[in-house]
Amino acid sequence: MSPELLRALPGLQHHTIVITGATGGQGQAAALLLASSGAHVIATDLAEHAQDLIDQTNSLAGTVEYLKLNVASEADWAALAAMLNDRGLTVHGLVNNAGVTMRSRLGEVSLDDWQHTQNINLAGPMLGIQAMMPLMTRGSSIVNIGSAAALNAHHTVAYTASKWGLRGLTHAAATELGPHGIRVNIVHPGYIDTPMMAGAAALMTTAQLMLTPLERVGQPEEVARVVCFLLSEAASYVSGAEIPVDGAFTSSAGVKVMSDLLAGRTTPTTA
């Protein structure tokens, strides 16, 4: 992790934050940044253990506790809520980061793959919100991790549909939980250098750079800082917001290619 991107943020000391999909990429970056800011992080994922994550927290101001959790399991969420309640912990933040890719195009998607994608990417956050909200108090914050694919007509139909659905869940939750003083926002990462993107075709990276005004891929820590800002008191009046972290990819909406051609610029081909 980049030290300059993992500087502590104010207003998170002693806060209990639950993060899903926390053993790698954006989830791990957020867990480490929160712990460096003095938070107590409940890091969850599907692995039995997360030694790599725990080893990186030894010198941080806060703590990271790892628990195995399947976000699509109502029973797993109920067990986590019961454990936190038994320990008398208030949940100050929830980051619904866990997700799966599904790159099949329309005409190739099986119903099982479709339902699996929706279960993880959409039902999982819904179950997490329902399980954690009774443990939250005024000033708590929920951050859902969407995608640039939730802002355009991306070809990965099952994944794209799940992330568009997550936008709807975010706005419904912001409306419902606002009177309780609980904020709900969504962050839309673009092309981020994570293990999830490692299997993407090289042509996809080339095309992404051609369409991204900042002409580079993003780093997990860059998403983590926006997530942690939304969890912090610095964002105390921010709710129902959608924040792209994508180097202006969705803002440009493909116009960068035309702009480059008209200006006689050569578009980038490597990260």
Image (tube, rainbow, N blue to C red):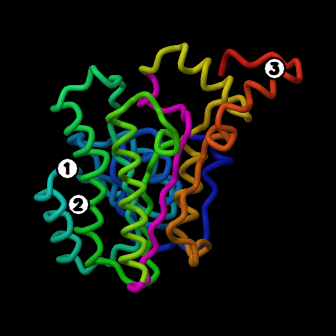
Between label 3 and label 1, give the one nearer the viewer: 3
Residue ID at (39%, 44%):
53
* Residue of label 2: 127
Q: Earlier in the sequence, mark 3 or mark 1?
A: 1
For label 2, count other residues whose C-alpha is less than 10 Å away and answer few (under 14), some (14-19) or many (20+): some
Q: Earlier in the sequence, mark 1 or mark 2?
A: 1
Give, as a three-letter code, the residue at label 2.
Answer: Leu
Give, as a three-letter code, the residue at label 1.
Answer: Ala
Between label 2 and label 3, give the one nearer the viewer: 3
Q: Earlier in the sequence, mark 2 or mark 3?
A: 2
What is the distance, in whole Å, between disc 3 and disc 1 at their CAs? 46 Å
**In the visual, does 101 lie left or right of 117?**
right
Residue 194 included in the magenta stretch of the image: yes
For label 3, count other residues whose C-alpha is less than 10 Å away and answer few (under 14), some (14-19) or many (20+): few
| Mark 2 secondary-structure assignment | helix
Residue 265 included in the magenta stretch of the image: no
* Residue of label 3: 261
What is the distance, in whole Å, between disc 2 and disc 3 at their CAs? 47 Å
For label 1, count other residues whose C-alpha is less than 10 Å away and answer few (under 14), some (14-19) or many (20+): many
- Give the magenta part as a residue range: 179-198
| Mark 1 secondary-structure assignment | loop
Of residue 79 and residue 214, the one placed in the foreground of this image is 214
